[in-house]
Amino acid sequence: MKKRVIISGAAGRDYHNFLVYFKDNPKSEVVAFTQAQIPGIEKRSFPKELAGKLYKKDIPFYPEEKLPELIKKYSVDEVVFSYSDVTHNQVMHLASIALANGADFRLLGPKSTMLKSKKLVISICAVRTGSGKSQTTRAIAKILKKNNKKVVSIRHPMPYGDLIKQKVQRFSSEKDFKKYHTTIEEEEEYQPWIDNQMVVYAGVDYKEILKQAEEEADIILWDGGNNDLSFYHSDLHIVVADPHRAGHELLYHPGETNFRMADIILINKVDSASKENIQLIKNNAKQYNSKAKIILARSDILVKSPEKIKNKRCLVVGDGPTLSHGGMSFGAGTLAVKKYQGKIVDPRKYLVGSIKEAYKKYPNLQLELPAMGYSKKQIQELQTIINDTPCDLVVDGTPANLKRIIKTKKPIVEVNYELGNKAVKELTLMLKKLKFI
């Protein structure tokens, strides 16, 4: 008999797991997906056009909190957990819910879900979201490009719209944002690639994405999302750790798996973290992954017109996922304001809508406003908060371009961040030693 399965996900890893493991599997039938973390994604379904010949109807989506009743409604045999950046406690609480309601609970690992490329693959993953994966990936891309390698990045999925239209997405200019109706969260990841005249792929079907990317690349870079595992077998696996959240490398799923699998553990943000926290990660690396090479990296802050910040009332806007489920209360924008002697204003009196609800859900949120924009309505809420908060200027610490996304009469100062030169030199030597260049 077929196993009846619910995939518990958050619009990313869950779709990949379905497509590579369950789509043509006659021994299992996925009867539903549950959706978490991202507001509104549960209002869709997984289209039969992508689900394959075994599925004659779309597969329904539900909020994760309905899991107990769904197990009974669909006579579910197995719940497959398929998303990232959650505590081990959270994973096991969900496992307990599944078991208590009569279903088995399962995690699919690298052997079951990683695809093999005919090109070299370097994967950049992390122990938590917001650790600095993308700046590390861009640094490696620049090294490879400088050595005449054709490089294409494949970004962890963020398909929050029409899944059929988002099956394979290729971004090489800002025109592609309009083409694919991207959210702020997506643009935060793709904008830096476009700024550096590089191609980045994303979407839903990562087998087809890989096939297309291989046509224009010598080397594929996996640009990880959250703290998820790579979707591809890697010839070099780099994992970024964050000393502002030291110890989390052993407390979050699947970040701990990345930490234990890494060939290189890059401890980022050493210029703004304590020596004690840096040492804690080094000690954990030595104990749990002694084969990994350790690289210490600065996260250098780059500010356009830093003189505009001094003595000004600054509303700081930061990366949404990092500040929400990532658990951080500050990012590069806050560090820039402190460095250039501005004053950070408090936006909390002026919160509205779903962003106000996010502050209730994530108690770590404080003075830095998360750039949440998963829908047009949420982008409008963000714009309203920015316009209503009394300030002299807006400090944009997101990787996206707020000037293009929102309408405001307030001046915006952009803050970017890049990997420090010393770490770049060490990575260059490693890539030469391993014959990538």
Image (tube, grey):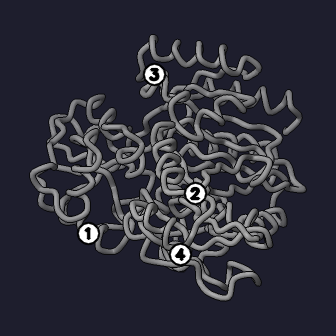
Taking the spot 64% from the left edge, 22% from the top edge, the residue there is: 295
Residue 413 in view of the camera: no
Image quadrant containing the C terminus: top right
Image quadrant containing the N terminus: bottom right
In this view, the mark in front (3 or 2) = 2
Q: CA distance from mark 4 to mark 3?
A: 36 Å
Q: Position of residue 344 (x, y in %)?
A: 18, 38
Q: Position of residue 20 (x, y in %)?
A: 75, 64
Amino acid marked by disc 4: Lys
Give the left or right position of residue 126, taking residue 217 as reference. Answer: left
Q: Quadrant of residue 256?
A: top right
Q: Which residue is mark 2?
A: 103
Q: CA distance from mark 1 to mark 4?
A: 19 Å
- Against 259, residue 29 (above or below) is below
Q: Which residue is mark 4?
A: 175
Taking the spot 21% from the left edge, 41% from the top edge, the residue there is: 367
